[in-house]
Image (tube, rainbow, N blue to C red):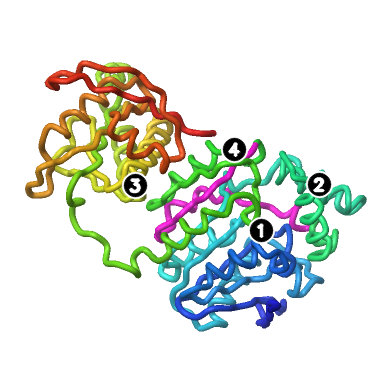
């Protein structure tokens, strides 16, 4: 089966192509500008991935202006023009609500911020600062003078460790998808720093990122933290292309898109054994003395908002009755969610200039009017007290639960005597993969 493209006319008269398959709620997907949809459809693994995404929904593949089946001879390839193309597609299809899936593209982020009531969920593969790279202008000039050399240079950056056949395939797909003149326009276009828009994205957001030196993992984490409701999933490897490498993350996308359709969202606190996270500002007394009461409280309020976003976006519940001094208590249904939350919390702490120490334990809790009580809660607080500034420690119980599901490693820190706990507790330091 080949992709069957249809057409609509955008705001400035440009003819834009799109393809659809599947039935159900609409998921609009767009690539970055590096190549069109047609060539990947010929790859069995890429086609299988897209067909999986189309099960139970209508998958709409948007072809960018200047590329592939869309009108090729275009002057304006600005972010604003491409955002308008997306809006014109939504209007053309008569949709009132959509999900958006974007790979290496800023336009869906801008659209979601400008149309908060139209976007139900947002999935981003690859995210960074949103600003233009320093080498873009040189690549644009190279594209106009030595198109084949420029393509190879671009794709070697995407596949820093190879394999060579993928570099060659992508270079050929790029040549088939656009002219060097259009490529130069995309390379030269001004990219607004869209990080300022992220706090205005109302839609729950999933960010998946596989970093390399051109797309650092820490920058992606920092950008993801700016969304009001965001789950950040770091991926292994250094291939910065969402159709190559390990594609098991597709299950994560499907689960994210379908979770509130398959079952009603759980109300209140999780039942049964809970994963308990305790986070506290390191040396809050010393920071207050150095910063002054007013400055410290302003930073603490900023951090509190970031911590609440981290808890909510990773599936946790903040315990309002257990906001202890400068600490926060939260419970989760899965150890990997609590560990991912800890990573987002540390990003928030670094951004606010207030480092945290975080402890995570698992055990039975007593619930009463939105609060949790019991020995497991006390152990979580004691584990946090053993952590250094910027560090997360977990009990052996949590380590065993998350050993194969969380994308982290654990460093054995030995047994610790914790105040109020009769038996020694073995603790592990969480180390995130770069």
Query: Which numbered disc flags the more N-terminal residue, 1 or 4?
Result: 1
Work out how far the residue at label 2 is from the one at label 4, CA to CA, in angstroms: 20 Å
- Residue 49's quadrant in the figure? bottom right
Please state if 146 lies on the left or on the right of 260 as rendered: right
Disc number placed over residue 139 in the picture, else none: 2
Residue beneath disc 1: 32
Measured in 3D between alpha carbons, the distance from the residue under mark 1 to the one under mark 4, in whole angstroms, is 18 Å
Q: At numbered mark 3, what does the secondary structure look like: helix, strand or loop?
A: helix
Residue hosting label 4: 216
How far, Cα to Cα, is label 4 from label 3? 22 Å
* Quadrant assignment for the C terminus: top right
Against 94, residue 128 (above or below) is above
> Residue 388 occupies which quadrant of the picture?
top left
145 to the left or right of 46 = right
> How many residues crowd around disc 2 within 10 Å: few (fewer than 14), some, or many (20 or more)?
many
The residue located at (63%, 50%) in the rendering is: 245
């Amino acid at each position: 089966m080949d992709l069957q493209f249809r057409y609509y006319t955008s705001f400035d008269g440009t003819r834009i192509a799109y393809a659809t398959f599947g039935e159900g709620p609409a998921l609009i997907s767009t690539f970055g500008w590096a190549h069109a949809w047609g060539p990947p459809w010929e790859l069995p693994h890429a086609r299988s991935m897209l067909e999986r995404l189309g099960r139970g929904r209508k998958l709409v593949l948007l072809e960018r202006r200047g590329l592939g089946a869309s009108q090729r001879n275009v002057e304006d390839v600005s972010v604003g023009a491409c955002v308008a193309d997306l809006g014109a597609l939504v209007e053309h299809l008569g949709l009132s609500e959509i999900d958006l899936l974007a790979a290496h593209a800023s336009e869906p982020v801008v659209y979601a911020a400008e149309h908060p009531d139209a976007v139900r969920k947002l999935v981003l593969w690859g995210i960074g600062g949103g600003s233009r790279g320093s080498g873009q202008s040189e690549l644009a000039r190279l594209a106009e003078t030595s198109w084949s050399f420029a393509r190879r240079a671009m794709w070697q950056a995407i596949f820093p460790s190879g394999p060579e056949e993928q570099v060659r395939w992508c270079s050929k797909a790029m040549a088939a998808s656009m002219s060097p003149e259009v490529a130069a326009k995309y390379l030269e276009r001004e990219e607004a720093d869209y990080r300022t828009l992220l706090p205005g994205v109302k839609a729950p957001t999933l960010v998946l990122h596989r970093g390399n030196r051109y797309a650092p993992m820490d920058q992606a984490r920092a950008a993801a933290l700016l969304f009001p409701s965001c789950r950040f999933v770091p991926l292994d490897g250094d291939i910065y292309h969402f159709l190559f490498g390990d594609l098991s993350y597709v299950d994560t996308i499907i689960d994210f898109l379908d979770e509130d359709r398959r079952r009603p969202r759980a109300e209140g606190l999780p039942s049964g054994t809970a994963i308990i996270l305790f986070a506290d500002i390191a040396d809050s007394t010393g920071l207050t003395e150095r910063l002054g009461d007013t400055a410290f409280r302003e930073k603490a309020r900023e951090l509190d908002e970031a911590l609440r976003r981290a808890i909510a976006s990773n599936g946790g519940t903040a315990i309002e009755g257990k906001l202890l001094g400068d600490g926060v208590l939260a419970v989760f249904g899965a150890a990997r969610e609590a560990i991912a939350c800890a990573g987002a919390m540390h990003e928030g702490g670094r951004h606010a200039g207030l480092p945290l120490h975080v402890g995570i334990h698992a055990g039975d809790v007593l619930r009463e009017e939105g609060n949790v009580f019991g020995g497991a809660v006390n152990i979580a607080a004691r584990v946090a007290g053993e952590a250094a500034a910027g560090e997360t420690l977990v009990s052996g119980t949590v380590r065993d639960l998350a050993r194969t599901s969380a994308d982290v490693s654990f460093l054995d820190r030995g047994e610790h005597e914790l105040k109020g706990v009769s038996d020694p507790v073995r603790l592990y330091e969480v180390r995130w993969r770069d």
